[in-house]
Structures are given as C-alpha cells and as structure tokens.
Amino acid sequence: MELADLVRKIPALRTLDDQDIARLLDASEILRFANGETIIRENQSDRHLYFIIDGQVSVLKENVKLCELRRMGDFFGEISVIDSKCRSATVTAKRDCLCLRLDLEAVDIEDAQGQSHILAVIYRAFAEVLADRLRRMNDELLYLRREVTRLHGRLRHDK
C-alpha cells in the first residue's frame, strides 16, 4: 500500500486533499518501534506528533498508566505540540508498532506561508480528543469527590 493511501485512512487526516497529504508526508517519516521500546519520554522536549498506523502503545505519567492507544489513527504527543513545553507523559510500545511521526515545526513553517490548512485539520483533531478526555476527567473527578464525601461521612459516623 502506498504511504499516501495509509495517511488517507487516518481518521483525523481524511479531509486533506492530495496536495496537503504530499506536504504532510514531506514533514513525516514512518518509524517502527519494538515491543517495550520507549517512543516518548516524560519531560523530553520536541515537537513531533505520532499517529499509530499499526500496534499499541501505553501512556504513563510518573509510572502510572493513563491509557492505552491501539486504533489506527490514534495519536500522541499532542500536548507538548500545543503548549511547546516538555512531554507530559512517557509513551511505550505495548507491542510492535508502526507510527507516522510528523514534524510539526516543518508544518508550522509551511502553514505560516499560507500554503496549506494542515494545521487546522490537526488542531481540530486535537480539540476533539482533548474534549473527550476532559469529559472523562470531569466524570472521574465527580466520582472521586462523591467517594471522598461518602468516606468522610463514614469516618465522622464511626467516631
């Protein structure tokens, strides 16, 4: 399968036309990672965004597992791309992995010249994923607050 055809299968990038896909591929490379290999290390600094083509990764913060990503098109590395700070988590291949690594600095330069809308498409995907994470975190926070209140009431009752 041709690389451009693979990119077209990535949900976040489906709306890109052939010209944008060619530009995106100019700023990308395909990388293979072995099971257990660290792809991104927490507190590391770079502006690469990774899309899973095949495989599975585990995302950890301070050695606590936050999630696993396994679907084609799942992406990681977006937080440091958005805020230009160090990596917020470590990402490790959970099994052999094939990823598209996109150099966002190269895309930034291209987009600044008004040549493409690649960044708009990518940031839209970021927004959708981050909104989903925020909703899940709100639900988790609500659950934990209710549990703390319940346990606090139980402790007062037991005294």
Image: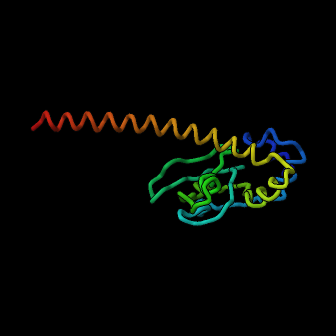
**Quadrant placement of the C terminus:** top left
Judged left or right of residue 17, residue 121 is: left
Quick one: which residue is furthest to the right in this view? 19
| Point 84% across, 48% down: residue | 116
| Point 65% across, 51% down: residue | 55
Camera-side residue: 115 or 52?
Answer: 115
| Residue 75 image position (x, y, % from top left) | 65, 49
Camera-side residue: 82 or 22?
Answer: 82
| Residue 26 image position (x, y, % from top left) | 84, 58
Give the total of numbered labels: 0
Q: From the viewer's perspective, is residue 46 above or below residue 117? A: below
Judged left or right of residue 134, residue 22 is: right
Can residue 21 be seen here? The reply is no
| Point 44% across, 34% down: residue | 139
Quick one: which residue is furthest to the left in this view? 159
| Residue 132 image position (x, y, % from top left) | 57, 37
Judged left or right of residue 58, residue 1 is: right
The colour mode here is rainbow
Quick one: which residue is furthest to the front in this view? 113
Camera-side residue: 70 or 155?
Answer: 155
Q: From the viewer's perspective, is residue 72 above or below residue 153? A: below
Camera-side residue: 134 or 22?
Answer: 134
Q: From the viewer's perspective, is residue 57 above or below residue 40? A: above
Can residue 138 be seen here? The reply is yes
| Residue 45 image position (x, y, % from top left) | 61, 66
**Residue 117 falls in image quadrant:** top right
